[in-house]
Image (cartoon, grey):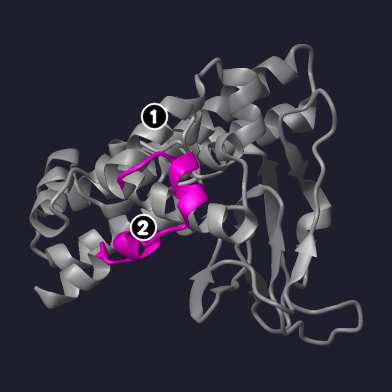
């Protein structure tokens, strides 16, 4: 669940030279879910970093929106940044939790050697969802968490390099766990969801992300389908390939910017996701029938022409 009004924002900062912030030891032994006066805390909280917690002992409840999940000794929780949650131990008792906080974007950009496309894809997997498991369900991940915590506890010679390698392994393990869920969806071949629901999911993703650089693989992942199925669905329901639809959405957004803000053509192209001006102009001519400069001068009925091309309306008529 994303952050809500009324929830407390808890900001954590990772020290320069370190790759992770660890909250370890006796400070994690306390009554969760109550304030210093023993009053129950009603609202949740959220962080600016990825949170990985492990319950060393105790019983209680983890709350994510309306979902309440019991925890006990050995429970592991992975919570992406900005996801509201709360922890409450069993009344009259205390629990012992230890935590790691990581900035996956900064870590992958500075430590992994990956290109921006790989980083973006991995971040989508890492920050995909909250999950709560017992350590026996995730033995590799649990071992990596324990090893990172032990390295930070002891801080022996070279521990930072050890932690760096372990953090990378931990993040890739989270990617693997979340990707396996995606693969399960791929193999279902329309059994649990209709094509309509999947295409809506794809269109929502495009609507939210068209201004950045996206690929068909990104859209397929968001819709829980293979790229082959994605192309088939777009052909059936939209009458065009997925990336052609992305460009259509970008051109519609560009028209709005030009009309509303009298935007510079070059600036507009970059704002709606085109990294190449000639590509922007070619697509503009394809959908509008003239160049952006020509259309800007005439302010003719091209906007209506674009608004008529309503994919959502086409789908609902089927």
Residue 110 figure quarter: top right
The residue where tag 2 is placed is: 302
Is 308 within the magenta? yes
Residue at 49 percent across and 73 percent down: it is 69
Q: In which quarter of the image is the C terminus?
A: bottom left
Q: Which mark is residue 279?
A: 1
Q: Nearer the viewer, mark 1 or mark 2?
A: 2
User: Vertically, is 240 above or below 5?
Assistant: above
Q: Is residue 233 left or right of residue 20?
A: left
Mark 2, other Cα within 10 Å: few <14 / some 14–19 / many ≥20: some
Q: How far apart are marks 1 and 2 (CA)?
A: 19 Å
The first of marks 1 and 2 along the sequence is: 1
Residue at 51 percent across and 19 percent down: it is 114
Q: Which residue lies furthest to the front in this view?
A: 298
For the question of whether residue 276 can be seen, the reply is no
Q: Say which element carries label 1.
A: helix
In the foreground, 222 or 155: 222
């Amino acid at each position: 669940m994303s952050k809500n009004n009324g929830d407390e924002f808890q900001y954590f900062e990772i020290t320069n030279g370190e790759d992770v912030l660890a909250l370890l030891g006796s400070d994690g032994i306390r009554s969760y879910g109550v304030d210093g006066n023993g009053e129950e805390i009603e609202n949740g909280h959220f962080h600016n970093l990825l949170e990985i917690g492990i319950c060393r002992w105790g019983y209680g409840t983890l709350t994510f929106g309306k979902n309440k999940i019991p925890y006990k000794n050995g429970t592991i929780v992975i919570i992406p940044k900005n996801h509201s949650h709360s922890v409450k131990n069993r009344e009259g008792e205390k629990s012992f939790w230890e935590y790691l906080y990581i900035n996956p974007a900064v870590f992958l950009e500075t430590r992994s050697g990956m290109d921006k496309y790989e980083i973006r894809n991995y971040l989508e997997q890492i920050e995909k969802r909250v999950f709560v498991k017992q350590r026996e369900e995730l033995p590799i991940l649990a071992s990596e968490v324990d090893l990172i915590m032990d390295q930070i506890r002891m801080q022996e010679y070279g521990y930072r390099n050890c932690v760096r390698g372990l953090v990378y392994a931990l993040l890739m393990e989270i990617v693997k766990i979340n990707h396996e869920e995606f693969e399960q969806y791929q193999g279902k071949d329309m059994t649990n969801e209709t094509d309509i629901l999947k295409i809506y999911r794809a269109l929502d993703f495009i609507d939210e992300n068209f201004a950045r650089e996206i690929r068909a693989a990104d859209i397929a992942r968001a819709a829980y389908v293979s790229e082959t199925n994605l192309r088939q669905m777009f052909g059936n329901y939209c009458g065009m390939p997925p990336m052609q639809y992305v460009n259509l959405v970008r051109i519609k957004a560009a028209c709005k910017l030009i009309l509303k803000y009298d935007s510079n053509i070059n600036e507009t192209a970059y704002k709606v996701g085109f990294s190449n001006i000639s590509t922007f102009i070619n697509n503009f001519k394809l959908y509008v029938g003239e160049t952006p400069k020509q259309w800007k001068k005439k302010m003719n009925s091209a906007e209506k022409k674009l608004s008529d091309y309503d994919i959502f309306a086409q789908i609902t008529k089927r």
